[in-house]
Amino acid sequence: MADSVRAVLGLDVGTTEAKAVCLGLDGRVLGLGRAGYGLDTGPDGRAEQDPGDWWSALSAAVRQLDLAGVEVLAICGVTQGPTLVATDDAGLAVRPAITWQDRRPGDTGFALLPRMAWLAREDSAAVMRAVWLLPAWDALGLWLTGVASSSLQAHEAAPEAAALGAAGIMASQVPPSRPVGSPLGGLRAMAAAALGLRAGTPVISGVNDGAASMLGAGLLDPGDAVDTGGTSGGLAIYADRAVQVPGLYCAPAPLPGRWAVGGAMAALGASVDWLRSSILGDRWTLEELFEAASSVPAGAEGLVFLPYLAGERAPVFDEGARGAFAGLTLGHGRGHLVRAVLEGAAYAMRHVAEPLAAAGAPMTSLRLAGRPTPGDLWGRIKADVLGVPAIVPVVGETAVVGAAILAAAGAGAVPSLAAGVASMAGAARRLEPDPATHECYDAGFARYRALHPALRSAGIGG
């Protein structure tokens, strides 16, 4: 392939859709595909998905790419998480996956081991049928290569046999570990046929999409931060040392020499979908709703939204937390509701950022990840609420770009992971905060902070 373009493929199994990107080593986007799937939810807290739907969507997403004249050097897949998949030896699921949104494992359910323990109690037959119990990214790696592995970041340790036994899981159901971003194996024939790719293409071990987003967003220096976007939402800030804040995340970043601090929320992106569909009945397009919100002044004329529609993770970690609109009047309309939801998501990020700044990990800029939204309204709201520039990446789906960067570094196509981030994670534009609007949002944020304690004291939630 003397005249071919050398590129890598990134795959991402997200909460609502699968994405695939073909990315040149210079950061050129050669193709981007996507396909969606559903989520099975129930009043008991169930939130499950059929991994077969993931594989079908991935196949559709990859086949949307025009790979004529492209030499695919390597592939890496990242996924939502912590999502538990019970598979047979070939990587096919023996039951639906228990997604990160599933609330049945209880208050400790935002990790993989509680999901294993819950499954062993509630569906022991599935555990007995399963050869492997894996996070979704390792299930994807198994499906692609036939190689079972536990991909661990530098700071992570494999689960101990005693802890697995206490959860009702055999140690043999968790495969040997290897570092994230290391060669996993060649693309096996079954997966190659489904994806329309060359069998034997090197596959690099993946990670959760939050970590991948840090790479794909272009984070390099202390103070660089990413709004991970998506259904749940989250904030990660790079620091040059460990910064511990109770209840917030602190661990070595996927980039050597950096620490990632921050937290993941539960329903920031989902709140927009909920308002558009469940409340407003899909009568307006997203563009029309954002246009209506843009005509409303900052602060939504006293209306504040608490985005705790699925409980909340950081920083309150309250499964029983409930969402709310506060300050409604007859003068508020559709645009106010939309603006309040957008501002509520930005307040949620500030709720995480402020204690980190006080502890020595200030944010200096915010990369915007996730689904593209109409115009720059939401990005400008985030810049104004947080008081830092918001940077719009060339590809908003930064997790799938991060997967491509992992593929390039793992295959030796770029000198290092940092070099891959520098050359492959491009920025489209920069949105500067407005000092006067930031000051206006100080008052709105104070009202936001007071809402959750007030609801709890009134017996709402919990």
Image (cartoon, helix red, strand yellow):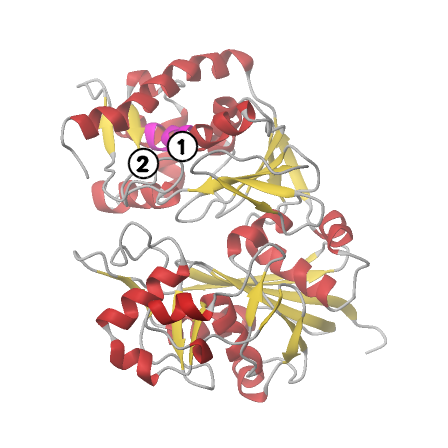
Q: Quadrant of residue 101?
A: bottom left
- Nearer-the-camera pick, 134 or 46: 134
| Crowdedness near tag 1: few (<14), some (14–19) or many (≥20) residues, C-alpha within 10 Å | many
Mark 1 / mark 2, whichever is N-terminal: 2
Give 273 or 49, whichever is nearer the viewer: 49
Residue type of the residue flagged with mark 2: Pro
Disc 2 crowd, CA 10 A, few/some/many (<14, 14-19, 20+):
many
377 displayed left or right of 8: left
- Decide if residue 144 is on the left or right side of residue 324: right
Badge 1 element = helix
Q: Does the magenta stretch include residue 414?
A: no
Residue range of the region highlighted in magenta in the rendering:
340-347
The Cα–Cα distance between marks 1 and 2, rounded to whole angstroms, is 8 Å
Residue ID at (54%, 23%): 358
Left or right for 25, reference 391? right
Query: To which quarter of the image does residue 447 belong?
Result: top left
**What numbered label is drawn on residue 348?**
1
Query: What label does residue 307 carry, if any?
Result: 2
Q: Where is residue 113 in the image (x, y as percent from the top left)?
A: 39, 62
Circles 1 and 2: CB distance less than 8 Å?
A: yes
Please state the horizontal and vertical placement of residue 429, each as a whole percent of the image. 65, 35
Q: Which residue is drawn at 47% across and 31% down?
A: 377
Which amino acid type is shown beneath numbered disc 1?
Ala
